Image (cartoon, rainbow, N blue to C red):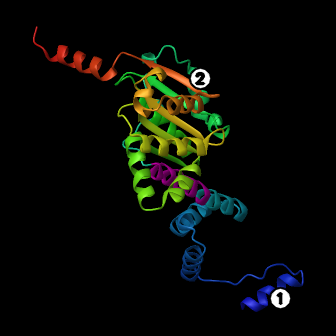
Amino acid sequence: MSTTTRKTSAATGAGPALTAMSDPAAEAAVHAAAKTLQLPTIRDQAIPMAEAAAKQRLTHKAFLAEILTAECDERDARRRLRRVNEAKFPRTKRLANFDTARLPDLPAATLAHLAGGSWIDAGQPLVLLGDSGTGKTHLLIALGTAAAEQGRRVRYVTTAALVNELVEAADDKQLSRVVARYARLDLLCLDEVGYVGLDPRGAELLFQIITAREERASIACASNAPFSEWGNTFTDPRLAAAVVDRLTFNAHIIQTGTTSYRLTSSTATRKENTPA
């Protein structure tokens, strides 16, 4: 039956008119339609799922529900993976692999709340403070990964790399475009704040990013320096105070302590390998 005849039947209220097809023709039509509609899971799984549905004696409605659900699930999985890849995390870190016993002052309820991401929707900052090796970056990446898998736009970057990008953009007269791109993120994960000093120009450019996101979109940052020492990074005491003010207003502040997990682990390994 032609397409015109099908439309006419539907318009007259007679219901959709179906065309009898051989199995090979039906399979070819499914593949062609799925390709046109950009439904890769249906294209790959429709035939084996149809055979399984026939064996299980599913109704046509049940089979349709199964194949559409499979497409939606796979599309959601691809979206989560794409968001994680777009975040540019330097390595894989997850909350499930974080030893919460290392931070007895971090309640499980607080960590669960942060993993849920409602603080991101509210535009609240997160600050992780502690010495090197205490788990700041692990938490930063893990929480960023959780946010990305929930469908949020996330980007991880070190402070030095971000400042270099901003300086290059300013030199190329592309600063407004780069600032706008960072402003559109749901979560900016800014690592290594305070590790290196910034010249006045770099500090001011970084301040533009922070200001563009103030009380609207979240920044999660990690630093090995207490707030009182941030003046060493931003050189201008007034600018340092303004940065601290914006990153601590309505913020979640987590102290990761002074005991290096990497150092403790290395020391324990050496003792185990030392002959008695």
> Residue 54 sits in which quadrant?
bottom right
Q: Residue at x 53, y 67 (%)?
A: 40
Position in image of residue 179 (x %, y %): 53, 52
Q: Which residues are magenta?
A: 71-87
Secondary structure mostly seen in the magenta stretch: helix
Residue 237 disc label: none
Secondary structure at numbered mark 1: helix
Position in image of residue 37 (x %, y %): 61, 73
Give the residue type at disc 1: Thr
Tell me how far mark 1 sits from mark 2, CA to CA: 61 Å
Q: Residue at x 42, y 62 (%)?
A: 172
Position in image of residue 226 (x %, y %): 45, 21
Q: Residues within 10 Å of mark 1 (few under 14, many from 20)?
A: some
Q: Quarter holding the N terminus?
A: bottom right
Q: Residues within 10 Å of mark 2 (few under 14, many from 20)?
A: few
Residue 123 left/right relative to 77? right
Query: What is the total number of numbered labels drawn onto the structure image?
Result: 2
- Observer-nearest residue: 32 or 108? 108
Q: Is residue 73 magenta?
A: yes
> Disc 1 designates what residue?
8
Q: Is residue 192 above or below residue 59?
A: above
| Residue 1 visible (yes or no) | no
| Marks 1 and 2 in Cβ contact (< 8 Å) | no
> Disc 2 designates what residue?
110
